[in-house]
Image (cartoon, rainbow, N blue to C red):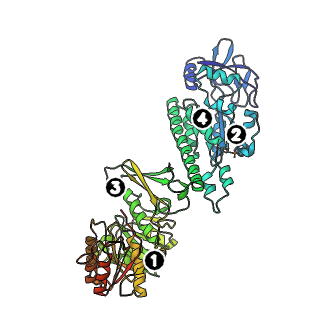
């Protein structure tokens, strides 16, 4: 379809009001005329058939194909226009130089235009397109029919093209926009005033992005500097393949809507935090793909890891934002286990080591000397620790790294311990180098501390469960002695230690500890007494004089959980209390001279 459009002179055209026949589809036009008379002109010059100059500032690589149609000059390759408006100006110079080299006219907003000018690339200010100055402190810059008409007009639609031509609106072929840094602004410390947050809600940017994405048949939208190179190669380059370009435009349109949707979810999350209370009536969680994983929990399951871009996660630390210093790529199960280990160890205040297998802590110890804590944690259950995840809440130095590298299981002195992951808040340079020497496969992660906090979301078939993370620390819990025997200060310390740990064990959870070290735990049993039995068995002879924590109350005591523990040598027990048979637990402990405390707090973990 051929359309007649009247052009006004711009700084880089030398013909005013020349009738130019513009092919609606560049690729069709190129193909159509390639078989006809075509010739390249002197670089930098576009001429009509009579030799008049149409475009004098064209860079050398612009392909020129001329055809003859009636008495008008036929320019099959219309002037391409790009509208660029960016908060994140990374790689802008590469982009605009690439566009300029392909003869694009560049239109831009204030700050972006200034950066483009600095790069030495010609740029037209958006106000010269709209005829209006940017106004209302930047609230209105690009919100104008001259912009949106140029983006949204369907090139194959005669009425559309006549309508924009009638209003002297020129088509815009490429929209490169990214938005005000709302997330960064509102999560900055100190948090900005409400008005400042509001001013950082981008309006004109999303409007252009959405318009361009909607008109993906004719217009390309790009929101991410990571896509500039592909854009230049697949769409902008004169020899770009039409099919490939169309596919790229569609993919970019998808990305653009995702970009806007993530952005809006951050804005609405922020507003809800200001004006709402309790669970938000609707919620969108912005996620960004971090990596495709080799497989999921099992090899036949496809899997990927996404990072949470919600505001509540902005400064939270933890596994998702960790740096992988060394080792094989993380697996699906690695993420789960590393998260469990790191959240557990970050719950301890003193220097500590936690070793996790299948999300359950199997070795936990606290000591002033982190190396000592590691030795105790691994010796607690070397069989389970093999192939586990080792987490620390203090940086790893060379001595500790050597110990991790060289440690041999006491049960099998031939074999050095194998771990999947070591995760810590930091490493000394020597510590890191030493650890790398353990194995090329050992994943070494550095993560910002992250105890359980914030919102916890979990999927069930057809829905999601939301709750506050279980962030209660023993410091916030009142332990009440309900037995005749009173705890020693050491027992009280051990009770708190076991209580921190039981919170991270799958229910029914029992932990037995002594002297800042986990001796045994029972996890995931469908009845409590079996968890008690397993924990006692694991603690073996060390159970004598230990303490026991239970994540929920004891439904039965005599001949059951409490009596079993007392008979095994446990000297202090803590449970939330609240059972109809609480008094049985008290009586049982009194009979055996064991201390019993209630916490009033339950730590189910399903
Ligand atoms: N109001 C508007 O018409 C408008 N048009 C574009 N913007 C935004 O302005 C920013 C770029 O501004 P500058 O080029 O002045 O640095 C971009 O993030 C873009 O999304 C606008 N700003 C906010 O809505």
Query: Mark 1 Cα within 10 Å, few/some/many (few <14, many 20+)?
Result: few
Q: Which residue is mark 4?
A: 211
**Quarter of the image where one finds residue 444:** bottom left
- The answer to whether the residue bearing label 2 lies less than 8 angstroms from the nearest atom of ligand 1 is yes
Helix, strand, or loop for circle 1?
loop
Q: Residue sitting at 35 percent across and 87 percent down?
A: 484
Mark 1 to mark 4: distance in Å?
A: 58 Å
Q: Residue at x 61, y 41 (%)?
A: 206
Local packing at callout 4 (Cα closer than 10 Å; few below 14, some 14-19, many 20+) is many
Which of discs 1 and 3 lies nearer the camera? The answer is: 1
Q: Is residue 500 visible?
A: yes
User: Residue at position x 34%, y 69% from top?
Assistant: 418
Residue that sits furthest to the top in the current view: 70
Circle on res. 297: 3
Circle 2 residue: 108
Residue 495's x, y, as percent?
40, 80
In the picture shown, does residue 474 fall above or below 156?
Answer: below
**Disc 3, disc 4: CB below 8 Å?**
no
Q: Secondary structure at mark 2?
A: strand
Q: Position of residue 372 (x, y in %)?
A: 42, 81
Q: CA distance from mark 1 to mark 3?
A: 39 Å
Q: Which mark is residue 478?
A: 1
């Amino acid at each position: 379809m051929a359309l007649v459009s009247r052009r006004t002179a711009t700084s880089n055209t030398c013909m005013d009001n020349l009738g130019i026949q513009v092919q609606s589809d560049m690729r069709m036009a190129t193909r159509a005329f390639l078989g006809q008379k075509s010739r390249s002109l002197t670089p930098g010059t576009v001429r009509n058939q009579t030799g008049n100059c149409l475009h004098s500032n064209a860079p050398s690589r612009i392909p020129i194909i001329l055809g003859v149609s009636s008495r008008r000059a036929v320019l099959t390759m219309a002037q391409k226009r790009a509208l660029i408006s960016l908060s994140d100006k990374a790689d802008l110079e590469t982009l605009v130089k690439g566009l300029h080299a392909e003869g694009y006219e560049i239109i831009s907003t204030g700050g972006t235009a200034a950066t483009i000018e600095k790069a030495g690339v010609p740029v037209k200010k958006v106000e010269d397109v709209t005829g209006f100055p940017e106004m209302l402190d930047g609230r209105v810059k690009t919100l104008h029919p001259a912009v949106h008409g140029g983006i949204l007009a369907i090139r194959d639609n005669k009425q559309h093209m006549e309508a924009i031509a009638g209003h002297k609106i020129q088509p815009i072929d490429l929209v490169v926009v990214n938005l005000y840094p709302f997330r960064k602004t509102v999560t900055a410390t100190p948090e900005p005033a409400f008005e400042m947050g509001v001013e950082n809600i981008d309006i004109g940017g999303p409007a252009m992005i959405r318009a361009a994405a909607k008109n993906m048949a004719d217009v390309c939208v790009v929101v991410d500097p990571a896509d500039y190179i592909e854009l230049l190669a697949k769409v902008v380059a004169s020899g770009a393949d039409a099919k490939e370009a169309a596919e790229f435009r569609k993919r970019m349109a998808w990305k653009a809507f995702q970009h806007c949707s993530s952005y809006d979810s951050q804005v609405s999350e922020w507003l809800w935090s200001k004006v709402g209370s309790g669970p938000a009536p609707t919620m969108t969680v912005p996620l960004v793909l971090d990596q495709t994983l080799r497989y999921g929990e099992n090899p036949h399951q496809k899997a990927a890891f996404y990072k949470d871009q919600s505001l509540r996660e902005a400064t939270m630390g933890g596994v998702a934002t960790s740096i992988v210093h060394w080792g094989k790529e993380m697996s699906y199960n690695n993420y789960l286990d590393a998260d469990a280990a790191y959240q557990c160890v970050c719950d301890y205040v003193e220097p500590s080591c936690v070793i996790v297998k299948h999300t359950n802590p199997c070795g936990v110890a606290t000591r002033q000397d982190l190396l000592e804590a590691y030795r105790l944690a691994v010796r607690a259950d070397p069989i389970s620790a093999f192939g586990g995840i080792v987490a620390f809440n203090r940086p790893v130095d060379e001595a500790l790294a050597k110990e991790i590298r060289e440690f041999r299981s006491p049960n099998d002195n031939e074999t050095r311990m194998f771990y999947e992951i070591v995760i810590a808040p930091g490493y000394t340079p020597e510590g890191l180098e030493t650890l790398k020497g353990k194995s090329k496969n050992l994943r070494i992660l550095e993560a910002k501390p992250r105890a359980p906090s914030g919102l916890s979301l979990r999927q069930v078939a057809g829905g999601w469960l939301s709750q506050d993370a279980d962030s209660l620390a023993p410091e916030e819990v009142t332990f009440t002695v309900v037995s005749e025997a009173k705890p020693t200060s050491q027992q009280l310390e051990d009770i708190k230690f076991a209580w921190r740990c039981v919170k991270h064990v799958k229910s029914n959870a029992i932990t037995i500890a002594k002297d800042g070290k986990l001796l045994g735990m029972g996890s995931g049993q469908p009845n409590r007494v079996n968890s008690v039995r397993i924990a006692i068995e694991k603690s073996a002879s060390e159970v004598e004089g230990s303490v026991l924590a239970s994540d929920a109350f004891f439904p039965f005591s005599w001949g059951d959980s409490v009596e079993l523990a007392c008979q095994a040598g446990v000297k202090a027990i803590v449970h939330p209390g609240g059972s109809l048979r609480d008094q049985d637990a008290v009586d049982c402990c009194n009979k055996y001279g064991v201390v019993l405390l209630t916490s009033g707090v339950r730590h189910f973990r399903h």
